[in-house]
């Protein structure tokens, strides 16, 4: 017979023996005996409740580490340029591969703007040829004027040229230098303008490319937020994708059990509504303790401080969903 059953039998005998005590004739004695019987009965009932609760409490399965809910990488694709939605290639629940085009926006106005800017670029290119020719002529003229100035300057020193001739040569030289400087300045300004227009074309190309929204990962479409014909503004969400190949969950381990797990350990993960057990790896363990979250179960319910551990599943699957409850066991 167990200790709990022996204690209950003992209490029952005490109550029975107390109930069989001879009754006193006076009323005061009767009240005293009834009070004693009632007190013993109360103790018996309380004991039965405690024993019953402790006997019905569920034992923690062997190897249990903790429980949590599945998480996965989520990517929200948003419009990076404005335009009417022309085409949507995927519905909710369908799979996508990295690089697949999921949405096409109307970017015809951007293409027209690009054509206009490119026409301006072509005009600048034509003007640059004329400016380059002007600079070449200015440099040739400067060389000739420089030679004339040098010759007259030599004659002026010998007294064979007048002051007026020397002054005219100097003035011509100054003008020739200014014309060459101006021609070079025009070329520099034109090059700066061409660079600005080239940047505008590059920006337009990027905005036009943004009209085709592609998937950055292999995933499953979780939600589709828009329909064909709607106008998408910059930042408006179009799709939400979930990478079903990489699930993980976070469990909380008490300090007493922290020594039984380590980063890199292989564990068994049991997911509700999934018949087969999954294999996971402990990818990280917090270096600092924290208070147990109220919505998380731990092996030792009395422990106030726990350590967060991240468990990564080695394989995902279409049957797994974000938010599914899961339990982790040491293998």
Image (spheres, helix red, strand yellow):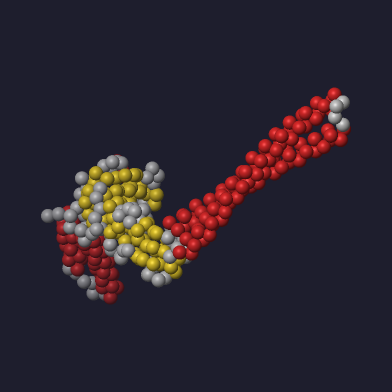
Q: Position of residue 78 (x, y in %)?
A: 42, 60
Q: Does residue 249 appear in this view?
A: no
Residue 101 falls left or right of residue 80? left
Q: Residue at x 29, y 51 (%)?
A: 246
Q: Is residue 152 above or below residue 63?
A: above
Q: Nearer the viewer, residue 311 or 111?
A: 111
Q: Residue at x 56, y 56 (%)?
A: 120
Farthest front residue in view: 160
Q: Quadrant of the N terminus?
A: bottom left
Residue 67 falls left or right of residue 180? left
Q: Nearer the viewer, residue 186 or 84?
A: 186
Residue 76 falls left or right of residue 164? left
Q: Residue at x 65, y 46 (%)?
A: 186
Q: Position of residue 81 (x, y in %)?
A: 46, 61
Q: Position of residue 37 (x, y in %)?
A: 24, 68
Q: How many marks?
A: 0
Farthest left residue in view: 1
Q: Position of residue 30 (x, y in %)?
A: 26, 73
Q: Does residue 317 appear in this view?
A: yes
Q: Nearer the viewer, residue 202 or 307?
A: 202
Residue 91 image-quadrant placement: bottom left
Q: Residue at x 35, y 56 (%)?
A: 215
Q: Nearer the viewer, residue 292 or 282?
A: 282
Farthest top residue in view: 158
């Amino acid at each position: 017979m167990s200790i709990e059953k022996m204690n209950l039998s003992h209490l029952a005998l005490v109550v029975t023996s107390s109930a069989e005590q001879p009754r006193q004739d006076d009323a005061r004695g009767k009240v005293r005996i009834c009070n004693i019987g009632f007190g013993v009965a109360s103790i018996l009932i309380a004991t039965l409740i405690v024993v019953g609760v402790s006997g019905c409490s569920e034992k923690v399965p062997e190897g249990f580490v903790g429980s949590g809910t599945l998480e996965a990488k989520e990517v929200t694709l948003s419009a990076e340029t404005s335009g009417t939605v022309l085409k949507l290639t995927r519905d909710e629940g369908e799979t996508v591969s990295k690089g697949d085009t999921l949405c096409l926006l109307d970017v015809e106005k951007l293409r027209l703007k690009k054509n206009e800017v490119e026409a301006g670029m072509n005009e600048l290119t034509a003007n640059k040829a004329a400016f380059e020719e002007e600079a070449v002529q200015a440099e040739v003229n400067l060389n000739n004027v420089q030679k004339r100035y040098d010759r007259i300057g030599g004659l002026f020193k010998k007294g064979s040229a007048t002051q007026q001739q020397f002054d005219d040569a100097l003035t011509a030289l100054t003008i020739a230098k200014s014309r060459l400087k101006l021609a070079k300045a025009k070329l520099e300004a034109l090059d700066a303008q061409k660079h600005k227009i080239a940047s505008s074309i590059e920006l337009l190309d990027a905005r036009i490319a943004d009209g085709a929204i592609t998937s950055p990962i292999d995933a499953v479409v979780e939600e589709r937020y828009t329909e064909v014909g709607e106008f998408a503004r910059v930042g408006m969400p179009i799709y939400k994708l979930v990478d079903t190949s990489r699930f993980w969950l976070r469990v909380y381990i008490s300090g007493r059990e922290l020594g039984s797990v380590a980063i890199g350990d292989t564990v068994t993960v049991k997911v509700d509504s999934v018949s087969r057990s999954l294999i996971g790896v402990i990818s990280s363990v917090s270096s600092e303790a924290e208070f147990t979250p109220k919505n998380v179960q731990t092996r030792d319910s009395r422990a106030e401080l726990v350590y967060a551990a991240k468990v990564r599943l080695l394989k995902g699957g279409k049957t797994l969903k974000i938010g599914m409850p899961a339990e982790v066991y040491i293998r």
